Image (cartoon, helix red, strand yellow):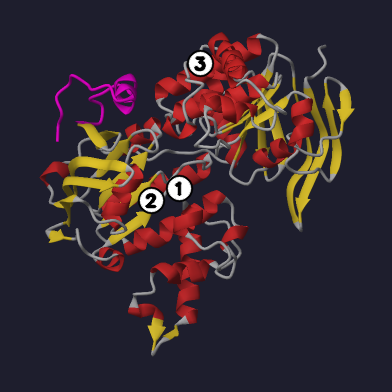
Amino acid sequence: MAVPAVELQHVTKCFAKVVANHDVSLCVYPGEVVALLGENGAGKSTIMKILYGLYGKDSGTILINGEEVNIKNPADAMAKGIAMIQQHFSLVPTHTATENIILGNVKGRIRIRDYEEKIAAIAKDYGFDVPVDVPIGKLAVGQQQKIEILKALYLNTSILIMDEPTAVLTPQESDNLMQFIKNFTAKGNSVVFITHKMKEVMEVADRIVVMRTGEVVDTVLCSETNEKELARLMIGEDITPPVRDESADFENSEIGLKVEDVSLKEKSGTLLNHVSFSIHNGEIFGIAGVSGNGQDDLCDVLCGLKKPTEGRVFFGEQDVTALSIRKHNEAGLGYVPLDRYRDGMVMDMSLAENILLKGSFDKKWFTKGFTRQKELEKYTSDLIVRHRVKATGPDDLARSLSGGNQQKVVLGREVDIGSHILIFNQPTRGLDMGAVDRIHHVMMEEKQKNKAILLISTELSEIFEMCDRIAIMYKGEVMGIYRNGELTTEEIGLLMAGVRSEKEVTA
């Protein structure tokens, strides 16, 4: 039998009293793709960060091509042919692709043209159409990811770790990435693929390692399993997705949210360009698009964080365009932001304190200026139970929870605040199947309560599963509005890339 390209034997890692990995053993053979699956907090990223030298192991053994190695830092890992592409890119926006790739890998005076030619040749070899002399900040997200991969290829990487690599890609870009993985492993290289997307796992993986609570619970051949079985291994129970009522007559209900010819211009340029749409009560309205095409700016306008240069925003019949953030909340808006760490929670505060932060204008939490602590703690405890948050109680610090459980807390708080309108900005990004399932069920429950719901997502599978109508955004413009089922995945993918459809728009 072939010697594994990389093998981990009985690796354990603890952070204080928390066991992140316990007795983890796995291996990857040359020319093989191994998918690493598990819930948030299962220890997938931690074990790979140990392999890449970002964390040190407490015990266990790492072997590369059958030889035991001591990886103290990423430089040691890269010297052994290991590279890791993480969810958040580590690129300098003002530097070109070439400058980013050679950064830290050259000494003395150099002729930049020589390196541009070398990197362009590597890119051509793998079918990457990326400019090597343009600043990173001017490139699309998909191209930026290719440059992250080129950084690894430039260093003659033979073991590539990819952590949620398709999170911000269009369907076409995801397909291209899958093809790259196949081409890369065909040359005898190895890939460890961390993802929550079952379709990608089934498409590209040879073997699947499933982790739960820091341990490996099973290793299966991709050809001998299915999505339902994998979900059961990950979560410990079957998942039943919510069913969208395609016969619902939402279009005859009142309009809950209306965006009327909204533009937003700043010194950096035009962020929103004459955006118009309306959402009926009892409707889930989806906005599809690659991140960075105006979705976040639109959310800022809808929440009162920014005032549009042109146009108006209505909650029902109320013009809220010029109102404060607090007035938006009082008008019945709930908002689950993209970045829960920056905009959704304060990590060093308790869960109860995080609830109070957003509800500080609500008199029910105060008596003569003092917090009604018992009522607040009871409410937080009820929210923990209602939304199946894995927490010991309202005094738990936000940072002690996994990402999925943090998101459930934010979701529970905002759903209660949003009595009329709910905005979800990529609410399931980076979450495991269990957390995603819970969030989707809550959204459907709120739809049944006749709320107007806006779902912004880069996941087309999520858009198709949840939404009644779909708008596609590209560079701050709405490329079209369609009923669910009117366009194929490929057609929406082209619109996400700026290619207009010939089909008639249904506003």
| Depicted 125 relative to depicted 303: above or below | above
Query: Image point 50% across, 23% down: which residue?
Result: 133
Q: Residues within 10 Å of mark 2 (few under 14, many from 20)?
A: some
Q: Residues within 10 Å of mark 1 (few under 14, many from 20)?
A: some
> Which one is closest to the eye, mark 2 or mark 3?
3
Which residue, given by chain and number where applicable, does mark 2 sit on? 442
| Depicted 435 relative to depicted 131: above or below | below
Q: Quick one: label 3 or label 1, which is nearer the N terminus? A: 3
Which amino acid, by three-letter code, is at mark 3? Answer: Phe
Q: Quadrant of the N terminus?
A: top right
Q: Which residues are magenta?
A: 482-507
The answer to which of 280 and 250 lies nearer the viewer is 280
Helix, strand or loop at mark 1: helix
Helix, strand or loop at mark 2: helix
Which amino acid, by three-letter code, is at mark 2? Answer: Val
The answer to whether the residue labelled 1 contacts the one labelled 2, judged by CB atoms less than 8 Å apart, is yes
Which amino acid, by three-letter code, is at mark 1? Answer: Arg
Which residue, given by chain and number where applicable, does mark 3 sit on? 128
Q: Quick one: label 2 or label 3, which is nearer the N terminus? A: 3
Q: Quadrant of the C terminus?
A: top left
